[in-house]
């Protein structure tokens, strides 16, 4: 995509017509299609998305706070994408206004990658260069956003998508980068459980601390023959007895959640070794069948939303290597077991630190 030149009729040009767009695109249509938001949010004033009505069934309730109108892909964002697909934005509009803006760099997408790209550009291009960030949500962050809810007078904070980060090796590139944006102590301190009896508390959504100690419950809804639904507390300790499922499913679920594989398995040691290549030749579903003796029905009924769900695809479509790839990033672990870290709102904090580094003079209200 070519840089926008400050001429009589500035335009962006599509790199190819493979997307079906081979004609010139005016600046107004480009900005209208992406629903410019982050650029405005980083400066001041209401963004276009903030001016649109909220509370529809698609978008759902977004809680409270500044992320309440940016809970995932809202209906307005979805509709804007469909308008682009349907070519609702007329590329031949005669009322396009030349704003005479000229930027040295345009970043499309205000997620962590987009913000980091802008920051690297700023640091390398110097203080006189300008960069415009385009984002189609009311607030920057992409997947790295949070939701806040008030429950019985207590404000609860949780991540939306991007949740964890790994402690980097000292003096590594990522360690120096974290330090440069204000994350000086990547290994966090956590509040200790003060109640009795002692409870194992997971620090991330990818752990199940306490599952074997009776701290968990499984919910079975009306689909399983219980009109009002039912909780099965301590499912592993009860060996799934009382679960409204077939005997076969009960046995398989107990085997899976208790970590009792039917086949010996050694995880890969590095990407590209023999084990990782074999895993990459099968789906997660095939791997679960092989390792735990699960049936396709059990996997697709009970496990599909979790196994591979974070990728937007089911275990029948994803490579089995996906389940182990993150473990091969080799975060710095000094034996404390704290290699994986997470802020209350997930990586929202890292996104906000990036913005503070980009515009420090306007970032007093962006403290994590």
Image (cartoon, rainbow, N blue to C red):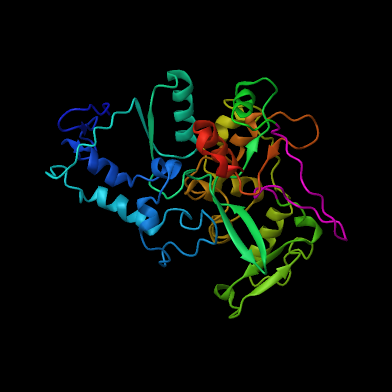
User: In which quadrant of the rendered image does the N terminus lie?
Assistant: top left
Q: In this rendered view, identify the residue nearer to me: 282 or 207.
A: 207
Point out residue 154 in the picture as x, y percentages from the top left corner: 68, 63
Identify the image quadrant of residue 239. bottom right
Q: Is residue 126 left or right of residue 356?
A: left
Q: Is residue 180 above or below residue 87?
A: above
Q: How many marks?
A: 0
Q: In this rendered view, identify the residue nearer to me: 209 or 50.
A: 50
Q: In this rendered view, identify the residue nearer to me: 338 or 192.
A: 192
* Residue segment shown in magenta: 185-207
Residue at 62%, 70% (x, y): give it: 220
Residue at 63%, 63% (x, y): give it: 249
Q: Confirm whether the magenta stretch covers residue 188.
A: yes
Judged by its main secondary structure, the magenta piece is loop
Point out residue 244 in the picture as x, y percentages from the top left corner: 65, 73
Q: Residue furthest right?
A: 196
Q: Is residue 361 above or below residue 153?
A: above
Point out residue 81 in the picture as x, y percentages from the top left corner: 31, 50
Q: Is residue 43 left or right of residue 189?
A: left
Q: Is residue 342 above or below residue 126?
A: below
Q: Residue furthest bottom?
A: 227
Q: Is residue 148 left or right of residue 75?
A: right
Identify the image quadrant of residue 186. top right
Point out residue 272 in the picture as x, y percentages from the top left corner: 57, 25
């Amino acid at each position: 995509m070519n840089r926008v030149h400050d001429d009589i009729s500035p335009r962006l040009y599509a790199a190819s017509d493979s997307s079906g767009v081979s004609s010139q695109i005016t600046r107004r249509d480009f900005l209208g299609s992406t629903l410019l938001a982050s650029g405005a949010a980083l400066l001041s004033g209401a963004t276009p998305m903030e001016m649109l009505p909220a509370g529809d069934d698609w978008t759902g309730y977004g809680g409270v706070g500044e992320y309440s109108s940016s809970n995932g892909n809202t209906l307005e964002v979805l509709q804007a994408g469909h308008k682009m697909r349907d070519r609702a934005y007329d590329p031949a509009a005669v009322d396009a206004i030349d704003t005479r803006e000229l930027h040295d760099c345009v970043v499309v997408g205000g997620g962590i990658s987009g913000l980091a790209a802008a920051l690297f550009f700023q640091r390398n291009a110097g203080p006189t260069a300008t960069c415009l960030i385009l984002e189609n949500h009311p607030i920057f962050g992409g997947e790295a956003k949070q939701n806040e809810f008030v429950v019985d007078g207590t404000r609860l904070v949780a991540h939306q998508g991007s949740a964890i980060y790994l402690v980097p090796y000292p003096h590594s590139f990522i360690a120096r980068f974290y330090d440069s944006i204000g994350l000086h102590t990547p290994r966090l301190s956590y509040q200790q459980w003060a109640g009795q009896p002692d409870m194992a508390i997971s620090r991330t959504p990818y752990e199940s601390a306490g599952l074997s100690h009776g701290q968990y419950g499984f919910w079975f809804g009306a689909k399983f023959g219980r009109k009002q639904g039912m909780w099965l507390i301590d499912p592993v300790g009860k060996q799934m007895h009382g679960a409204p499922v077939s005997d076969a499913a009960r046995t398989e679920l107990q085997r899976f959640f208790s970590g009792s594989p039917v086949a010996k398995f050694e995880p890969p040691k590095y990407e590209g070794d023999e084990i990782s290549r074999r895993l990459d030749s099968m789906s997660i579903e095939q791997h679960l069948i092989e390792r735990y003796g699960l049936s396709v029905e059990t996997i697709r009924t009970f496990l599909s939303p979790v196994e591979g769900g974070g990728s937007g695809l089911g275990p029948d479509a994803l490579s089995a290597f996906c389940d182990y790839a993150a473990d091969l990033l080799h975060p710095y672990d000094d034996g404390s077991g704290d290699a994986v870290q997470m802020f209350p709102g997930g990586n929202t904090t890292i996104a906000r630190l990036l913005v503070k580094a980009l515009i420090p003079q306007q970032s007093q209200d962006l403290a994590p």
